[in-house]
Amino acid sequence: MPTRLACAALLVCAACARHVAPAPGEDRTVASGVPVVFGSEQDLPKGTRVLWDFGDGTPPADGPRVEHAFPRAGAYRVTETVVGSDGQKLSASVNATVLRRPVPAAVPPDVRAAWVQERPWDRVTVHRATAAKLALTDTFDETAAELSDALGFEALDPRAAQENGFDPDEGLALFTVPQDAEALVAAVGTSDEAKALAAVKRLLSRASEGRFAGGPFQLTDTRTQNGVPMLLGAGRGGEQVAVVLRYGYLYLRLPGLTDPTLAMRGVIALQPSGGLVAEPAWQLAIQHVGQGDAVFFSRPSEKDGQGRFASQLGLAAFSLVDGPEGLQMKLFAQPRRLSPEELQKTFTPLKAPPDVAARLPAGPAAYVKVSGRPDALWRELLKASQADANRARERAEELTGLDLEKDLLPAFTGNVGIALYLDAAALLEAVLGEEVGAFDRSGFLAAAELAPERARALQQAIDRKVSAAQRVPIGGTTLWKLGGGAAMAAVKDGYLYFAIGGVPQDQEEPDPAPPSRRDRRRRPAPPPRPAQLGPIGHALAPERGARTLSDQLKEASVSGFDSPRDQVGWFDVQGLLRSLQAAAEGEGGMVGAGARMVADRMAALRDAVVVARPAPDGVDATLSLRFRRGRGAPPAGGAEGRPPR
């Protein structure tokens, strides 16, 4: 009888064991670093165990219901194994597709400003090459060495980063928060929280330089009111830090004198499916600037607007795109005081822009083409700075005798080209401190298109205000010397030319000697040659076959000057370097050697092009630093300096 009872009990137990089958659930898609629940709570027969293998290299978990956060993105096979009291094993598996959690999802949604880099370790080689082309190799290497020394491993090596718990497949962010205006928080993706925390503890537990000069920090483990673990640190000079691990990212409030827990409130409240990535303002900015290698995002707070610049801009963002052909920055901003309709109107001239650069001589170091309604641009200057507008009004009347708003502005179509002509020898003398006044030999020359019906009247009005002694005939028109010769102006072929500075020293006219009685009967002295008047002389009386600035810009593959709303700028880096090197050769010695060294270090940088245009919801702009052919061809699309439409 006892034997029969024992057999019956064994059969009952075996039957019960067979009823506990593995149930891992359905295939699922989750985000890296975010805890996911597998299984459910249930009463297991005595001696029965449930084991979970997540296929991602982490240790198995034990229990009918477990939480697991996949440390890295990828495809994994999750296996649930039920081990009965008799040792029998039953297994079942499901697929888990783990998506990479983007860095903006790990940034609190209410940040004031953020710098975001996705997968920075993948781009180290490209960034180092660009730093070399910009003569920043030493700065790049020194920064990397300081960071590596502080962390205790090669910070730019993705393998070393992974060995120390950081995920090269994710990224990093720096951001400021509204809870503490003085705080700066860093966030870095992790693949092993324990190793990453140990690396940061090494950083904080030693005396360092720079931002961590207040170390070593005395570290204390604590928990927030809702139970989130937090590491606090206090430095020698009163600086405080805080560290939090949250959803696959390590957050470090950098050293500061304020309470570090204030800056961590948004981090602790962050939800896995929220973050900055879900904010409409961020999404709008990314639509305009793209992801890039790095993105900077900023938006005003209620306390902003007191400063002159902050009061003009609302949402602003830019991205950096690094490549072998050049470095491109895409920008977007929303003016606070202009509606989209007003913005379009302000930057649309009264007529389509002509080739203004064809009116200027070749050879400037920089050129800017501006198009817009003259009256609207003037109103915006009044809004931005009444004092600057008043000075401009007074200066215009002083030089020309005309009222800026009544006489000058209505005469223009709104298409202006402004070129900067640098005298390399004079610039070198000024830098060396030999002759600071040599800057006067460099100057600006502007050409502004006039309304056809206004050009003649404007010319006559200025001619009446300028004395005969200050009029110089040249190129079939009259050049006026204004302000005692500090500025020069002329009207020719429907354009107003205006120059400040730029008269070569060796071409300056000496003061004439008093004429003798016989000389008074002779013909007056011939007018000055165009070269004696600087760039404006060459513009008004060009030599036959002389190259224009338009020819130079076409050779440099810079365009966009025919677009009514495009504001275009160009800076000829190589041209300036060649001029400086030529001028320095005349100095010889250390000066010549130093100029050659600078030219060699900057040999890869060709020029810089910037284009800005109004968009339906703000202003788009692109700044392109272009490298020379042979060292990198002009970037596709960026060669024209045009932002995407």
Image (cartoon, rainbow, N blue to C red):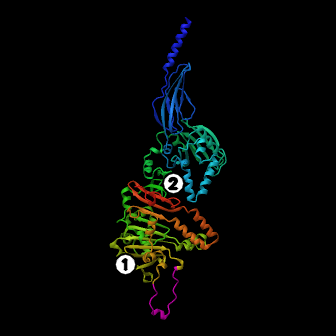
The C terminus sits in image quarter: bottom left
The answer, for residue 515, to whether it is visible in the render is: yes
Stretch in magenta: 507-526
- Distance between the alpha carbons at the discs numbered 2 and 1: 53 Å
The answer, for residue 173, to whether it is visible in the render is: no
For the residue labelled by badge 1, is the local secondary structure a helix, a strand or a loop? helix
Q: Give the main secondary structure, helix, strand or loop, of the magenta stretch.
A: loop
**Where residue 134 sits in the image (x, y, percent)?**
56, 59
Is residue 573 positioned above or below 437 on the image?
above
Asked if the stretch drawn in magenta spans residue 2, the answer is: no
The amino acid at mark 1 is Gln
Asked if disc 2 and disc 1 are in contact, CB closer than 8 Å, the reply is no
For the residue labelled by badge 2, is the local secondary structure a helix, a strand or a loop? strand
Q: Nearer the viewer, residue 275 or 142?
A: 142
The amino acid at mark 2 is Asp
Name the outermost residue toward the bottom. 518
Is residue 526 positioned above or below 585 on the image?
below
**Where residue 110 sits in the image (x, y, percent)?**
48, 46
Residue in the picture at 48% in, 94% down: 517
Q: Mark 1 or mark 2, which is nearer the start of the sequence?
A: 2
Which circle marks residue 486 in the picture? none
Is residue 361 positioned above or below 103 on the image?
below
**Where residue 443 sits in the image (x, y, percent)?**
50, 72
Tell me the residue that label 2 is attached to: 322
Asked if the stretch drawn in magenta spans residue 509, the answer is: yes
The N terminus sits in image quarter: top right
Tell me the residue that label 1 is attached to: 460
Task: Tell me if mark 1 has few (under 14), some (14-19) or many (20+) residues whose alpha carbon lies within 10 angstroms of its own.
Answer: few
